[in-house]
Image: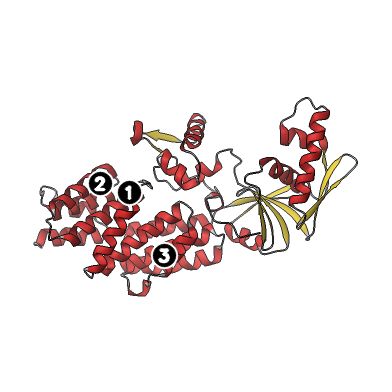
């Protein structure tokens, strides 16, 4: 490898893309194209970066399998950063296998981390943890060790383990300081900010207050009936009942928990649950049916009792509270994804949230009309983004597996 290529590679490793471009910008051999692609990715021009990486992969000869595999890994990282979550994972697996066979364990580990980060983004935490367990971070260079701890912190946040996330971010910061890469340190600072800002609202006995993720973790460890409006579940210590597919029951549970220990009038429940403006006997009959269903669903956690004016929630534990997003919005989960500051396609959002692309597109159109999201590009190249929303409950709203009830 000639001196200019070596110098450009060192500049990229130190987080200096302009310094790297100064050395290889006018060259079109395969190694220079690969370095130019990485530099353009660091500067944020992902379209140009991917084109350069593909040209570099084609430029390496048949005997340069390792170099081609490294280009595939680099393109996969660019796809991940640009939120192209549909990028073929099998291609990355093949490149990783090639690197392992040829003894390039560092880049093979980097490829593994890219797959783990993709699994994290789409909410497949069990698979991400399984793959992470097969890696030995102690043998990695500081930059990859920082990346490892960032993934550990991301999984802990999704699982609402604030203390574990904070410890992982502290380890990541130490590794980033040894790596001396400013962009990596900035990413860790951004992740730490999520832990230090309000993550949810606690509604108890008609009063509200903001909670950080640490406070949420502490709340869930207490014997409290928590109606979680972020993930549409009802929790009681270690037990959990999901009402994600039963919106009427969840609306009733939330209304009753917000008023606890008082009751809620039947007219109020009908207005909140069924949007009934003119109440007749059919509405009252349906309310009785749904209350019966809610009573059967929550029988191991609480009872729903009839009062003179309406219904009241009687938890089997000490108290009942509602855990709600800091900002009430019908499309809060979409906003939670966009709050990371990256540009997303509607297909990537649908994959990350486990819903249909058409539903995501409708949500994005409504958010754009309200000034909460913006787009650029046209057709399949359209991307959506929004500035980070202070205090928005990102970790609570993103997908995560739920423990069995």
* Quarter of the rendering containing residue 171: bottom left
Instruction: Give the residue at the far top of this rendering.
Output: 278
Residue at mark 2: 50
Which element type, helix, strand or loop, lies under badge 1? Answer: helix
| Crowdedness near tag 3: few (<14), some (14–19) or many (≥20) residues, C-alpha within 10 Å | some
The answer for how far apart the CA atoms under marks 1 and 2 are is 8 Å
- Please name the residue that numbered disc 3 is placed on: 131
- Residue at 24% across, 48% down: 40
Q: Are marks 3 and 2 in contact (CB under 8 Å)?
A: no
Question: Considering only vertical position in the picture, is 266 above or below 144?
Answer: above
The correct choice, above or below, for 401 with respect to 275 in the image is below
Name the residue: 46% across, 37% down.
357
Which is nearer the N-term, disc 3 or disc 2?
2
Q: Nearer the viewer, residue 78 or 14?
A: 78
Labelled pair 1, 2 in contact (Cβ < 8 Å)? yes
The quadrant in which the N terminus is found is bottom left
Give the farthest residue toward the bottom.
138
Q: Secondary structure at mark 3?
A: helix
Q: Secondary structure at mark 2?
A: helix
Mark closest to the chain's N terminus, 1 or 2:
2
Contact between labelled residues 1 and 3, with CB atoms less than 8 Å apart: no
- Disc number for residue 365: none
Residue at 46% from the left image edge and 51% from the top image edge:
122
Task: Give the percent coordinates (x, y) of residue 370.
Answer: 52, 31
Report how far apart the C-alphas of labels 3 and 1 lie in the structure. 20 Å
Between the residue at mark 3 and the residue at mark 2, the CA separation in whole angstroms equals: 26 Å
| Place of residue 223 in the rendered image (x, y in percent of width and height, measured from the top left) | 73, 63
Give the quadrant of residue 381. top left
Q: Which residue is denoted by mark 1 in the rendering?
A: 79
Q: Left or right: 370 with respect to 383?
A: right
């Amino acid at each position: 490898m000639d001196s200019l290529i070596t110098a450009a590679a060192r500049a990229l490793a130190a987080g200096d893309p302009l310094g790297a471009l100064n050395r290889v910008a006018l060259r079109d051999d395969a190694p220079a194209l690969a370095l130019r692609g990485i530099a353009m990715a660091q500067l944020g021009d992902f379209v140009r970066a991917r084109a350069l990486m593909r040209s570099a992969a084609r430029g390496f000869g048949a005997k340069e399998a390792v170099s081609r595999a490294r280009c595939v890994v680099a393109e996969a990282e660019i796809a991940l950063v640009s939120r192209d979550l549909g990028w073929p994972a099998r291609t990355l697996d093949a490149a990783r296998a090639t690197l392992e066979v040829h003894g390039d364990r560092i880049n093979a580990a980097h490829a593994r981390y890219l797959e783990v980060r993709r699994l994290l983004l789409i909410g497949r935490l069990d698979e991400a943890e399984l793959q992470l367990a097969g890696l030995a971070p102690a043998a990695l260079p500081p930059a990859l060790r920082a990346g490892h701890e960032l993934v550990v912190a991301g999984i802990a946040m999704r699982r609402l383990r604030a203390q574990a996330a904070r410890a992982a971010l502290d380890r990541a910061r130490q590794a980033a300081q040894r790596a001396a890469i400013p962009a990596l340190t900035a990413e860790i600072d951004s992740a730490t900010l999520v832990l230090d800002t309000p993550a949810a609202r606690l509604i108890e006995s008609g009063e509200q207050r903001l909670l950080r993720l640490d406070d949420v973790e502490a709340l869930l460890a207490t014997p409290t009936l928590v109606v979680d409006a972020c993930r549409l579940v009802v929790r009681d210590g270690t037990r959990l009942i999901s009402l994600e597919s039963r919106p009427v029951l969840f609306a009733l549970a939330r209304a009753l928990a917000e008023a606890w220990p008082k009751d809620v009038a039947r007219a109020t429940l009908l207005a909140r649950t069924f949007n009934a403006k003119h109440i007749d006997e059919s509405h009252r009959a349906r309310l009785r049916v749904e209350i019966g269903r809610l009573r059967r669903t929550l029988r191991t956690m609480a009872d729903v009792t009839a009062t003179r004016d309406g219904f009241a929630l009687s938890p089997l534990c000490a108290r009942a509270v509602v855990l709600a997003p800091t900002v009430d919005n019908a499309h809060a989960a979409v906003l939670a994804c966009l709050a990371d500051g990256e540009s997303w396609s509607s297909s990537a959002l649908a994959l990350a949230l486990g819903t249909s692309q058409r539903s995501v597109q409708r949500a994005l159109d409504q958010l754009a009309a309200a000034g909460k999201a913006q787009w650029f590009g046209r057709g399949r190249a359209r991307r959506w983004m929004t500035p980070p929303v202070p205090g928005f409950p990102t970790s609570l709203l993103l997908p995560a597996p739920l423990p069995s009830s």
